[in-house]
Amino acid sequence: MAEIIIVEDEAQAGAIYARCVADLITAKPDAVLGLATGSSPLAAYRALAGIVKEEDIDVSHVRGFALDEYLGLPLTHPESYHATIHRTVVEPLGLDPANVHVPGDVLDGAPLADGERVAAAGPAYDAAIEAAGGIDVQILGIGADGHVGFNEPGSSLASGTRVKTLAERTRVDNARFFGGDLDQVPTHCITQGIGTILKARHLILLAFGAGKAEAIEETVEGGVSAFCPASALQLHPHATIIVDEAAASRLRHKDYYRYAYAHKPAWQGI
Ligand code: F6R
């Protein structure tokens, strides 16, 4: 089972992620970070940027691979995940942009109709991750429908990076980034598959707020099912799920998760 850590707020979750990743980079200066967009990881990125600055950690060799990207948005579009990752991670942390990759980089706005090019991008991305030696720590958010990356319910739990159709609920949730205009939200994306995500050596999933409570319950205490793609984390040997009280509210074994974390030996880390 994954380790469940119930925290007070996003800042506390961010500090746990940041300490873990800062220690990793100190031990392995060319660490490979798996990166997510969305609101859940923002406090974690801020905390990591703070530690990197305070402790003067050299991040010039750190490499990064993002989870996903909208299809059909040029890299320069402010809501492309290429632009978002650069704004929220690359710049604040001071990473070398040449070391950070997003699945749609080679497509740069190519439309879904550009079949051959679009279809080739996924396998090429998985090959690039493998050539980098695999992802050391992958940060994840979770959709209210249980998606991770853009693997919507029904996604193969063995999938590699590929093109997917976004669920209507995800498009509605994300319309807030497009001035509330649903028509501006792309219908397709390219995303690391669940199989790709499971290859990362450590997964850290963050979820905050009551809107995530049902998805967290399914993920942690439901059966492993493509119906809730995040439930595949149960198959991973090193998955850490950090949630606030609201996101944890439907968990039946909360007391045990709290007890286990409180009694964890300090040498174990997360
Ligand atoms: C983002 C991603 C998505 C989000 C999820 C939650 O790269 O892959 O799975 O993590 O939609 O989004 P937030 O964090 O905005 O609630």
Image (tube, rainbow, N blue to C red):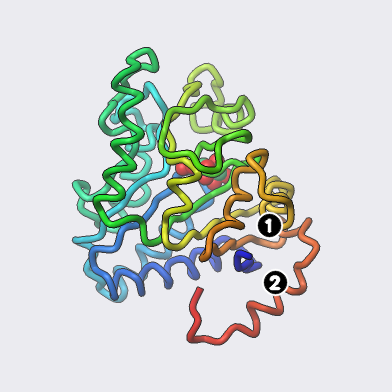
Query: In the visual, does 257 lie left or right of 204?
Result: right
What is the x, y in percent for residue 227? 67, 38
Q: Is mark 2 within 8 Å of ligand 1?
A: no
**Vertically, is 185 above or below 95?**
above
Residue at image position (36%, 32%) is 78
3D distance between C-alphas at marks 2 and 1: 11 Å
Return the residue nearer the eye: 223 or 221: 223
Q: Is residue 7 visible?
A: no
Question: In terms of secondary structure, where does tag 2 sit?
Answer: helix
Residue at image position (44%, 36%) is 191
What is the x, y in percent for residue 163? 43, 28
Q: Residues within 10 Å of mark 2 (few under 14, many from 20)?
A: some
What is the x, y in percent for residue 73? 36, 24
Q: Residue 262 occupies which quadrant of the picture? A: bottom right
Q: Amino acid at mark 2?
A: Tyr
Which residue position holds label 1?
A: 220
Q: Residue 168 occupies which quadrant of the picture? A: top right
Question: In terms of secondary structure, where does tag 1 sit?
Answer: helix
Image quadrant occupied by the N terminus? bottom right
What is the x, y in percent for residue 40? 53, 51
Return the residue nearer the eye: 65 or 201: 201
Return the residue nearer the eye: 244 or 127: 127
Tell me which label, 2 or 1, sits earlier in the chain: 1
Query: In the visual, does 154 lie left or right of 47?
Result: right
Residue at image position (66%, 49%) is 224
Q: Amino acid at mark 1?
A: Val
Which residue position holds label 2?
A: 257
- Of all residues, the one furthest to the front in this rendering is 158
**Vertically, is 199 above or below 116?**
below
Q: Residues within 10 Å of mark 1 (few under 14, many from 20)?
A: many
Query: In the visual, does 90 lie left or right of 199?
Result: left
Q: Is residue 169 visible?
A: yes
